[in-house]
Amino acid sequence: MHSTIRLLIAAFLVAVAALGGALYLDHTRASGLDTFAGTGNGIASLDLKALLANPRAADQRMLDSAFRQVEKEYYRPVDAQVLLNGEQRELVAYLRKHKIASPSIPTGAANGDQSHDVRLLNRNLQLAQSQYGKLTSNAELTQAAIRGMLNALGDPYTTYLTPREISSLEDSLSGGDFGGIGVYIFQTKAKQVVVDPIDGMPAVRAGIKAGDQIIAVNGREVAGMSLDEVERLIRGPIGTVVRLTVKTHKASSSHVLPVTRQQIIVPSVKATFEDGFEYVRLADFGKNSYDEVRKALADGKARGAKGYILDLRNNGGGLLDAAVEISSLFVPESKTVVSTIDRAGVRETKISTGDALGASPLVVLVNKYTASASEITAGAIQDYHVGLLLGTKTFGKGVVQSIYKMSDGGALKITTARYVTPLGRDIHHKGIAPDVVVAQPVEAPIIDTPKDLQLAAAKTYLRRIARR
């Protein structure tokens, strides 16, 4: 969730936070327990007296833990000097953004001794806090130090998530449970914010249509805002009203629509029975996605579907376990779905669970924003020839991440392994080429409309199979 585009599922939640940056959550690590507690390196081992005597000790210990965790878990060998340089650069950049013209944060030379290198990291953080903390924020300086350290790896998927960001991510993968209006929001190449409302949600009831452009939220124009900022404006307490200024596609003027927020629990699947085919559009690989996909396929069989379409376009991924479970609906029993390989070369193979429903013939729709967990499922289906991939080449994210909770409520998202398909294909930065190429724009409002050339091609293929 590398990040060439942000696709926020804002009903409101972040799912596919940065496309291709969708991740594998190790459930034991993301369970809410502090990953570092009880190890001698973590929060549980802190000396309370020392904390009271030095309130900055917690910040330094958090930086210490982040450094050690990256050195231990990152899927490639880590150069400590790179981490030190990254911390120094980000602290200087952060302070300059806060109008401190010439911040004095020295560079340090790592020597490979972990204790020595950690002391240098903490020295720079302590120096920044003591000299500039009153002008900025000790907590934000700590976050900047960690962020700089991780960014220096040059891996867009390894990053620090603030408490708000990790909360939004957990919301997205659990289906969400908050006050929102029920829309997906996207940002076009022209930086316009457009929406794709979810059926049965408040936005649809208020008259918002797919492709509508959001001009303002409660009178505040959104031009120049990030999708994060737009999301925060739209979300709010359940039962309150948010006023959206929207412009319908090709309309000459905008209009204001009041929308009452309600508790939003977002399904990851949209399933319809179209022209005798079961069409299943999967938005992300969350905790409930397997059950939703399985039900949709079973409903199709009950209706006598002549074929099945699994739409993974614009799906940036999600949970590895969900990808394995959903792949198992199509892949033969006890077959390899995906293999992950860590820094030491240790390979862990995920096997299909034997839940195949016989959903055949099958077409899987993919495009350049089909990423991560989506590529695991698409790759397995293609390798076993149990479905036809149609569309355009996928994104090419062949690495997985684990989440490590931090004492401030934030988290580290660290790339801990790479993965290969059942036939051993490494798709990182390469993507998966579809069996049949059908090009079309990727804008969400086109999907599942009369202008959807890829969906039309899938139906044509299935009709031809049905006539045999």
Image (tube, grey):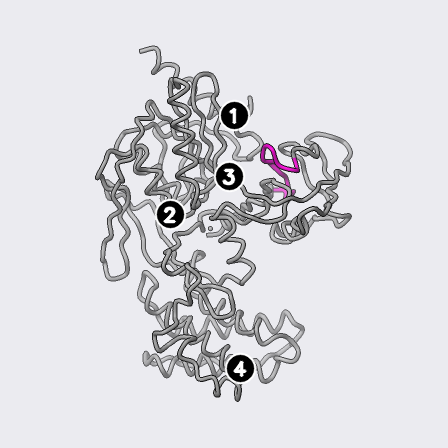
* Precedes in sequence: disc 1 or disc 4: 4
Residue 424 against residue 85 in the figure, above or below:
above
Look at 39% across and 19% down and name the residue there: 305
Marks 2/3: CA–CA distance: 30 Å
Read off the residue under disc 1: 452
* Precedes in sequence: disc 3 or disc 1: 3
Marks 3/1: CA–CA distance: 22 Å
234 lies left or right of 159: right
Q: Nearer the viewer, residue 6 or 377?
A: 377
Image coordinates for residue 378, horizontal then vertical, percent: 35, 36
Q: Which mark is residue 56?
A: 4
> In the image, what residue type sits under mark 2?
His
Read off the residue under disc 2: 429
Is residue 412 a member of the stretch shown in magenta? Answer: no
Q: Quadrant of residue 316?
A: top left
* Precedes in sequence: disc 4 or disc 2: 4
Look at 51% across and 66% down and name the residue there: 409
Residue 138 seen in the current view: yes
Q: Nearer the viewer, residue 332 or 178?
A: 178
Quarter of the picture containing the C terminus is top left
Read off the residue under disc 3: 267
Contact? badges 2 and 3 (CB < 8 Å): no
Image coordinates for residue 308, horizontal then vertical, percent: 39, 24
37 lies left or right of 92: left
